[in-house]
Image (cartoon, helix red, strand yellow):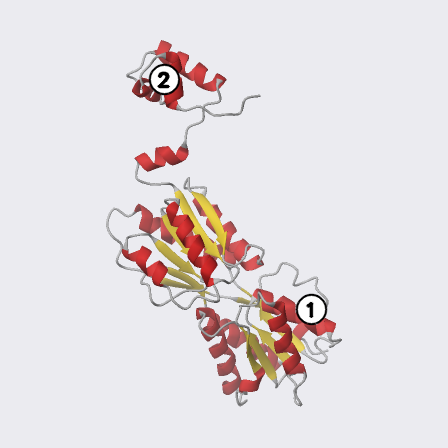
């Protein structure tokens, strides 16, 4: 079977018609006779002609495609965000190109460059844990590329952003641990420069302060690769467990850190929550069935993706330059399970 596709020019040459006539015939134009339309359509079907959506969209000044940059698609949070993006994109006739940074700034830079070379209409991005300089994105923004940030955002570019209430999510999680009787609560988090880190760290600290507990910086550990480096997380856990007054609870700030800490506590034969309780930000679908069931702060990931895509389309479709932008802050949900419950 010949699966090679042909072009309008190929059809025109074989049928001895003009390219314009073939194009109009395929579009069922009133200008073309029914006999010619039939001739062209039958030949096109017999020879596997398929319209080129990229070429068609470029004629209209749009590629009908959007680029997505995330740290890793195997992260439950980001896979759910992508589902939300797709729910809007496909209804609107847009294709998406998904790229992963694996927490590398260099990969983020390469991915953004690659996507823009594909003539995308807009970009949805969550910054890598290594990203400190957003000059590569500022340059694109100044050139008019619609950009929307989600989850990990920057204040250096004035555009739409979709985030969660990181402060209150962390505050409520820490408060739950305190009300459950835990006093020495450690916090394992991502690099300080990430937007999510500050909000969650501040929520954790405020909950301690409001309940008369001094913040002990020895209980705060930063994972500079955002959870990608397992050895980094293991070192943080080992340092906490080696403390003379080791923590009786650990609050973790991201998906990978949370599930990795659970694994490491098991590896060290630490009874959860009897010896050390655990509660963390994670959108894992297995929270209920893990041993013990995992207490979690869950982000509305699907809704983050959905709203991010809607905001991006608003910029893309606007007939005038968009100058007013918003930061949407969505609530988190706390699920209290056995990993943080006193028996």
Lateral position of residue 184 relative to residue 87, left or right: right
Quadrant where the image shows the N terminus: top right
Image quadrant assignment for residue 227: bottom right
- Which residue is denoted by mark 1 in the rendering? 263
Residue 330 point in image, percent of width and height? 45, 63
- Quick check: can you spot residue 307? no
Residue 2 point in image, percent of width and height? 54, 22
Question: Is residue 264 depicted above or below 88 in this figure?
Answer: below
Q: Residue at x 33, y 52 (%)?
A: 146
Residue sitting at the far left: 320
Q: Residue at x 51, y 76 (%)?
A: 171
- Which residue is denoted by mark 2 in the rendering? 12
Query: Depth check: 164 or 211 in front?
Result: 164
Q: Residues within 10 Å of mark 1 (few under 14, many from 20)?
A: few
Image mark for residue 170: none
Q: Earlier in the sequence, mark 1 or mark 2?
A: 2
Q: Residues within 10 Å of mark 2 (few under 14, many from 20)?
A: some
Q: Secondary structure at mark 2?
A: helix
Question: Is residue 308 depicted above or below 225 in this figure?
Answer: above
Q: State yes or no: discs 1 and 2 in contact (Cβ < 8 Å).
A: no
Residue 31 point in image, percent of width and height? 28, 16
Q: Secondary structure at mark 1?
A: helix
Q: Residue at x 71, y 69 (%)?
A: 292
Question: Is residue 87 depicted above or below 237 in this figure?
Answer: above
Query: Depth check: 235 or 308 in front?
Result: 235
Residue 256 point in image, percent of width and height? 59, 65
Quadrant where the image shows the C terminus: bottom right
Residue sitting at the far right: 269
Give the alpha-carbon distance from disc 1 to disc 2, as whole Å: 64 Å
């Amino acid at each position: 079977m010949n699966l090679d596709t042909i072009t309008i020019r190929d059809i025109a040459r074989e049928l001895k018609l003009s390219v314009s006539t073939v194009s109009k015939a395929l579009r069922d134009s009133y200008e073309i006779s029914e006999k010619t339309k039939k001739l062209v359509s039958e030949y096109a079907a017999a020879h596997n002609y398929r319209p080129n959506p990229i070429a068609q969209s470029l004629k209209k000044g749009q590629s009908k495609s959007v680029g997505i940059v995330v740290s890793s698609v195997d992260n439950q949070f980001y896979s759910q965000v992508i589902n939300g993006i797709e729910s809007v994109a496909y209804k609107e006739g847009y294709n998406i190109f998904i790229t992963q940074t694996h927490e590398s700034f260099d990969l983020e830079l390469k991915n953004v460059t690659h996507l823009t070379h594909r003539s995308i209409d807009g970009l949805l991005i969550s910054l890598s844990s290594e990203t400190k300089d957003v000059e590569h994105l500022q340059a694109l923004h100044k050139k008019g590329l619609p950009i929307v940030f989600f989850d990990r955002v920057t204040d250096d570019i004035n555009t739409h952003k979709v985030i969660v209430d990181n402060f209150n999510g962390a505050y409520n999680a820490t408060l739950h641990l305190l009300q459950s009787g835990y006093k020495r609560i450690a916090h394992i988090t991502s690099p300080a420069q990430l937007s999510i880190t500050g909000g969650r760290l501040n929520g954790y600290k405020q909950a301690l302060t409001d309940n008369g507990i001094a913040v002990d910086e020895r209980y705060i550990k930063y994972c500079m690769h955002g959870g990608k480096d397992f050895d980094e997380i293991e070192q943080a856990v080992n340092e906490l467990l080696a403390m003379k007054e080791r923590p009786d609870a650990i609050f973790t700030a991201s998906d990978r850190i949370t599930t990795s800490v659970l694994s490491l506590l098991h590896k060290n034969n630490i009874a959860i929550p009897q010896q050390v309780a655990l509660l963390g930000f994670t959108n894992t679908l297995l929270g209920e069935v893990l041993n013990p069931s995992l207490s979690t702060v869950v982000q509305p990931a699907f809704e983050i993706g959905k709203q991010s895509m809607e905001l991006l389309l608003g910029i893309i479709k606007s007939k005038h330059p968009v100058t007013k932008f918003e930061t949407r802050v969505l609530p988190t949900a706390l699920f209290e399970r056995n990993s943080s419950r006193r028996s």
